[in-house]
Amino acid sequence: MTLRKRITDLLGMGGDRSAGAPQYEALSDGLVITGGHAEAWYVLASSNTDLMDEAARDAELDAADAALARTLAGLDCQLRILWSPLHAADYAAEAAQMFSAGAWQEWADLRVRRLDQLGLPARHLLLGVRLAERSGQTEQAGRRGVQGALGLSSPGVSTRELARLDAQMRRLGRRLESSPWRAQPASVELLAWMISREQHRGTVLPAPSAGGVIKGAQLATLTRGRVLPYSDHLRVIDGTGRVAAWVSVLTMTGFPEEMDVPGGGEWLRILSEINYVPDIDESALAADLDPADLIVPVSPEASVRFRVLPKREALKVVEQARRLAKEQRRSAARQSAEDPGRDVEETEAVMAELTREMRREDLTLVEDHPRLVVTSTTSLEDLRARVDAVITHYGGIGIEVSVGEEEQRELWLETQPGDRLRVPDLGHRRDVTALSGSWWWGGAMVGDDTGPIVGYLTGSTPGVFRTDVTGGSDRGDATTTALIGRSGRGKTTGLELLLLDAAFRGAYALALDFKGDLGGLAHAAARYGLDAHLVQTSHKFAGVADLFHLLGDEGGLDQARGEVPAQLSIAIPDHLRDRGAETPITHATNAVISAGDPATWKVIEHLRGMDDALARETGEALADLAQTALGAPFMGRPTGETPPLRPTPGIWVVQMPGLSLPSADATRREWNPTQRLSVALMHSMLAYGVTTAGRRDLRGLRKVVAVPEVHLMTATREGAAFLGYMARVGRALATSLVLDTQDPESLVKLTGIIEQLTTVFGFQLTSASQQDALAELLGLPPGPHTRALIQSVGLLPDGEIRHGHCIVRDRRFAAATVQFDVPSAELLDLLDTSPKATQLPDHIEHEAARV
């Protein structure tokens, strides 16, 4: 170290404080190249630490320590945590690619308005690693005159140099890919956004060249702006000369000796938890405003430059500290007081213990320089309110945070990608766990990357929740979704939202409504222009589930020739079956088919007119049963008021609230008349579901079969077999299965179903056995921690029910808490699952009749 550098460091002037801003020369996927050096940049994935138990957290923390100590040792790194606002209007553009049926524009606009209300930011985690110095280029940079002052370097990066740097970036990336952060090279578009966002000008990002590189004149748009430094903040000036943003850079100057994880030790993860109440004119507030809506997130961003010391260098530093403490202790012992002081003794002991741990574990030291960037686009007073909230929040957990007085320019430049450490005296040297324990990648992340938005994350990191129940087949993945939990927790409303989004995608959605509370689904579908049909077990809907109509479209009546006699044989009393009634039923079925335009009610009339006494008695019995609510849909004579079921896009709700299915171990002789008719009606629906899914002419149609209260079906052999078949063949037949149940214990026994689950929504359950079964389906470790989690989900802090709140396990087996969100009060009323919503409104009846 030169004498000049020693003096400048002593005076607090070291670390290249006066150096110019970075001169960008090129950007490409994973690379930021400046006149002085090149950096590799990676996007880091979030981890669902919110739901991890202690053992899983410890294991992931150890893996993070190992990645820092082995992969990044000796490298200059920069960690950036950025937030971007959710541009709700972008969802309208996505909707045009997703939806095609009904008034989908109105449906998308409804969600856009709700997203604007929620204002959920998105978190971006990026890691930069310095790869190589460009000393030869630095000499050239001094001769570039005005271009260098503008932040634009004219000579391009050679193809050979770019290829060499790209190879280094990808080689390091492969090692970081296996870390808990699952690093991937940052796209050139993301890097351009990261640089240009600091200007707050909203300019269109330049498109990369054919080689995927942004360089030359394209870079000018990223750095064309003015930033004016003041003592405690900076002002970003837009193209019109007005202040576009007020920015303040904070330093984290003091940390407690020990910090708890989970808890205050997660000093980077908790960025999303910092809130404040902005200064708002009270006269502009609505009278019925919820006070909680006034609390908004600060969303401070973080920039941490750090360097992990190689093990040998770190051991040398620790040993020097131990020896110094030892000498101080001995020196004090030779003095008259003979008291070395408790701090000296503790330092010596701690250094000795740290040396032992570093020799046998993936533990080393890290030099880190954390900075927090707070921004306001409202006013300087709002910025200072945000800064106070950040300082207060961290002060509550013992971390000292302060504004970088008189060094805002240096600190702000230090946060920019491609820059350097400028203020080294505001840093810390500690073990790597102090950095990895900040859990910058922790929080919550679940759901699909694209697709309909149905809710939002409720963990420690905000964000929207996307899922598409029809998307499994497109991905070549499983197609079964399950909603599991107690009654009255929002399962049915969540299912309705999923089916509506599917219908807007042009899907045929069939809901087998055993409980009779899905009438609101048809109400909402009709309100937003979808074909809506509500079928009920009553004489009004006689013949809608006639197997001849349901199966006859599949290129012939061969299947109906066998299914109809089987169905009628289930419905007849035992004494007629014992006397051989199945024979005249088969004869009548064949005769009706031969006559043309077959129907089940015609089979019954044919039996009543036969000469055989047994046939006439069977026909009379079936005619009487056809007048019942359960018998009319599958063997009643159509009244002409409602059309039969058919596989056309839209919402089809089949309500069967009086269904009473026998248990799987009950013999047929033990079935009562209601159970016989229930099984016969279910026979129609199952045969229809299987046939519709397998029809070749419908392979290109998205299809969804929803089964609420699925535990009623899993209790029967026929129902369990149907569900297993639909789950296994769903991908090949583009048919999705959506299950709703209160009994996860019975579901986990059905291997054919649980192997095909792609998404699981877990709502509150209270018994230990059911909680353990749900934990298995969610992929969470069974035990007291998970039971307590399932017990508390769906509850507000005061213990009241939080409808629609659940734990979601997505297709990647990630799990996080999610809130289903109904985007308007009108839609919530339409999706009412109470008994008053089971009647079909007139406008739905007319639409059904017209179709």
Image (cartoon, grey):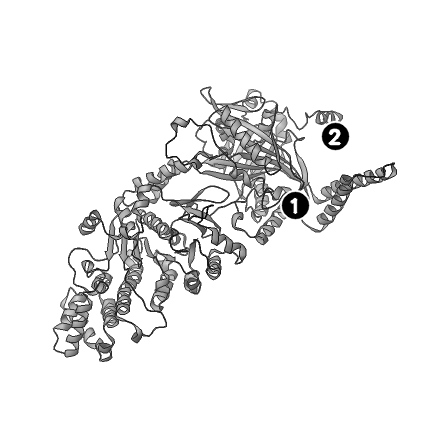
Real-space CA distance between mark 1 and mark 2, rounded to the nearest whole angstrom? 26 Å
**At label 2, which amino acid type do we have?**
Met
Is residue 241 in view from this perspective?
Answer: yes
Left or right: 835 with respect to 447?
Answer: left
Left or right: 246 with respect to 423?
Answer: left
N-term-proximal mark, 1 vs 2? 2
Label of residue 333 in the image = none
At horizontal 76% and vertical 39% (from top left) the residue drawn is 343
Above or below: residue 295 compared with residue 660: above
Is residue 224 in view from this perspective?
Answer: no
**At label 1, which amino acid type do we have?**
Ala
Residue 238: give x, y in percent of width and height. 47, 23
**Which residue is disc 1 drawn over?**
69
**Which image quadrant is residue 827 in?**
top left
**Which residue is disc 2 drawn over?**
1
Secondary-structure class at tag 1: helix
Residue 64: give x, y in percent of width and height. 60, 47
Q: Nearer the viewer, residue 479 or 223?
A: 479
**Which image quadrant is residue 703 in?**
bottom left
